[in-house]
Image (cartoon, rainbow, N blue to C red):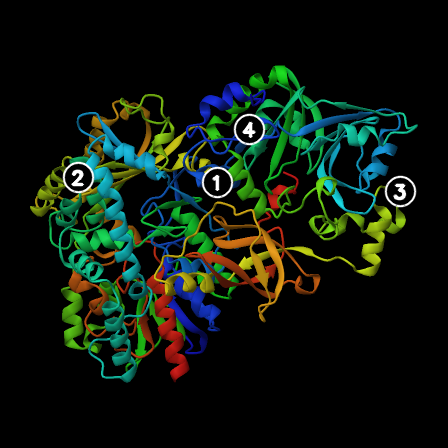
Amino acid sequence: MPTTEKKYDALIIGGGHNGLVNGAYLAKGGLKTLIIERRHLVGGAAITEELYPGFNFTTFSYALSLLRPDIIQDLDLVKHGLMVLNMPSTLAPMENGDHLYLGTDHHANYHAIARHSKKDAEAYDDYKTMVNKVCQAVKPLFDQIPPNLFSEEPEEVARLAAVGSHLRGLEPKTLHMLTRFLTGSAAEILDDYFESDIIKGLFSSSSIIGSKVGPRSQGSGLVLLFHKMGEVDGAFGDWGFHKGGNGGFTQVLARSARSFGAEITLNAGVSNVITKNGEAIGVALENGDEIYADIVVSALDPRRTFLQLVEPRELPTDLVDGIRNYKFQGVSAKVNFALDDLPEYPALPGRKDIYRGFLNIGPSIDYIERAFDEAKYGDFSRRPYIDACIQSTLDPDMTPPGKHVMSCFVQYCPYKLKDSTWDIERDNLGDTVQKTMESFFPNFSDLILHREVVTPLDIERTVGLSEGNIFAGEFLAPQMYFFRPAPGWNQYRTPIKGYYQCGSGTHPGGCVIGGPGKLASQQILGDLKRE
Amino acid sequence: MVKTTPFYPRTGPLNQTMLWEHWAGYLVAQKYQYSDTFEYYAIRNSVGLFDTSPLFKYRVKGPDATKFLSGVLARDIRICPPGHAQYTIWCNDKGWILEDGVALHITEDEYWLTAAEPNLGYFSHLIGYDKVTITDISEEYGILALQGPHALDVLGQLSEAVRKLKYFDLIRTKIAEKSVIVSRTGYTGDLGYEVWVGEEDAVTIWDAIMEAGDGYNITPFGQKVLHMARIDAGLALIDIEYRTARHAWTDEQRSSPIELGFGWMFRKLKKDDRAFIGRQAIEKEIAEKSSRWKLVGLEVDWQSYEKMYNDLGMIAPKDHTPIEEAMSVYNDDRVWIGHTTSFMFSTILKKHIAMAKVEPAMSAHGTEVLVELIINNRPRAVRAKVVKMPFFNPARKTEHI
């Protein structure tokens, strides 16, 4: 006979990175907290798995940058083993066999770009300064609970006024560029600064990650800016690889959460939130158990949070409609390889040091746009954009000595295929990626010991992200800030008292970022204080 | 013409940046590649390789070697049996520190000692009737430091014997059929080993280690990264945390071992009857609590630091490059209470940290202080607090593996 005895103050549905961050903050804030994870391991889409003996794969997410720096401090993550290895370079191969190789040295980068265009090499500094200024302008908005545009509460009016006054304080050019990023295309901005295809191809690649846009689509500017908000040791736009992959990172989060007193239960799927008189009082597990608490937080995406964990009939119609129309449209896949050795790039023979960062297969805006074209009509790209990294070059513990793991992030792979299914196309996608890699690295196929193909359908099935969208909802202007995930519900609360949301479908958004988990905890702890 | 170390035939071509420094008259790499942090994380995540050959090296040999050194070195060398090494210091008769180094007890009557400065004359002049000789072997040996969690995975392939080394143990063994001495020591605060090799065999040893380390991403690292690692590890460095009393002009420039935090070396002084140089002054300082300074760790308050820059309309820089010079330290009333010796953004700790000399009254852990930074050419104060050193201290450094 289930008892309604309350054992916890707060339950968090989903042990992805935002659930863990939220749980750690709530426990730190004094709440008796339980994080409930459906799978056998925490991390959600930020996991590392030994899918081939001795080889550890970052099955889904594969690098770190957007993680909010204050979380590292607040949650003592260094003490629990945080180790972010800077990814020091990007190699962008070209279809004519040439390449662009950028590293950490300012002047070396000048000369690397100048090989392709002296004008672009000079413009690179102007571009970086401009992007840094825009990022600095966005940062305070990024790291605070956004205002509720539709509330008359004095606190919300003041919050909105603060945003207005922050924007008025910006240089006119910075505010104008910010607007262009938020509403325009990446290609338009890059065209203003650069002339060479390889530069524009490389720099536009961040504008399409995880999103059903091409660099020339309106909206790609926002995706580009979002990715520039990341940093490693204060440098905007830098990326790192966590020791042991993002699974290593979420294990750090789990240790931190436990150190503050949070409990984590694994292999426990939540079937629904239990409500009583319009208030959340606990959750029912798939095995029939019920757990009770005053606060229930969903770290799942908005579709699951509003349409599956609770009954839509308990919610306002506008909200239900808003969530039904909230766009997921996953377009990203992963193909992960175990390699016997490092590949060879013919123009840089014998160079092993070029693989420590990203390999960017997207040599021009045209290349990426063509890859996008196929996706528009429901097919996957036959010559895809690929963001690859060979992570064992940074962390030898990913593989047996001398062997390598390579993560390939692939676009575009639309969740809904027009004439086929992903169960049929899985191997075709793997072959396509392999063939594309081989067109740049001729010995690539000879090196493969093992291959794992992760389609958008696999992402949805394994991790639970609707339509395999890696951001738990697309980065479209009408789905951000005031409207993430729905008008009036952008402050982590829901219409059901005691029921909150903390997943990447809330502000500031996706990537391994922690911001939603952190800001939601501020709202929850603030609400408890106000009561 | 600057001298090169026995490993230079290999280190030379590996330096992609061509940035070199002079260390004790030798050419050494400041860094090998553009990314400092890539070199740095070799030490914390895989294995890094550092050419530490420019150290001065002395062989102290004879039936009275132990007796001689126990009177010359301030730390009791008699507790260091053959097959062990000891971190040590030596002082002048006023109790001011001259230098620090590592003594390797090779056999019953033989020690090898490292030093940052020439000391042949200094030590030789202290020999009276003791049966001991001192030889400068600086140019006869190269030293390679292998530092990082995979150091033993690499070295263990080349010599089974090194696997049993505990922290500060040493052993004479063979690598690639060449005779070497391996000690479990280093200057990075991580698991690490140092390999002493005859200069004629240096390149052979380098090649063997690089080959064995290939699967572990073995990475040569330069001076800059060594300094980043030693600050994390809270290790004092001559000419930065202290000046040798030999060449100082005034006592203000001199330091006592107690002031530098080496008081732990003298905990058993009452049971120890050695008449070592500086003993009386050190005993007096301990008894009278007359230390003027205490070397402490500082951790900068990250919010105070970020806010200071943001208020100025700037992005707060997080620079890994150590600033190894004095920045003033104040108490809350803005009274000067000391100065930093080393300051940097620690990439592994994600915080600005500093080693600093402060008044003993301000040295307790948790004490809040202000550190003066120069921003836009103006001094500004950022909050910091006294914390325990080492800042970074992984268990693998000392534990049996």
Chain letter of mark 1 equals: B
Q: Which of the two discs, 4 and 3, labels the residue nearer the N terminus?
A: 4
Three-letter residue code for mark 1: Tyr
Q: Which of the two discs, 4 and 1, labels the residue nearer the N terminus?
A: 1
Front one among A318 and B323:
B323
The reply to whether dot 2 and dot 4 touch (C-beta < 8 Å) is: no
- Which residue is rendered at x = 18% and y = 73% of the image? A319
| Vertical side of B22 occupied by A308: above or below | below
Q: According to the image, label 2 marks what residue?
A: A425
Mark 3–mark 1 distance (CA, rounded to whole Å): 43 Å
Mark 2–mark 1 distance (CA, rounded to whole Å): 40 Å
Q: According to the image, label 3 marks what residue?
A: B274
Q: Secondary structure at mark 3?
A: loop
Three-letter residue code for mark 3: Arg
Is A417 left, or right, of A209 in this rendering?
left
Front one among B393 and A33:
B393
The disc at residue B41 is: 1
The disc at residue A486 is: none
Mark 4–mark 1 distance (CA, rounded to whole Å): 17 Å
Task: Check if mark 2 and mark 1 are on a common chain.
Answer: no
Is B249 left, or right, of A374 in this rendering?
right
Q: According to the image, label 4 marks what residue?
A: B154
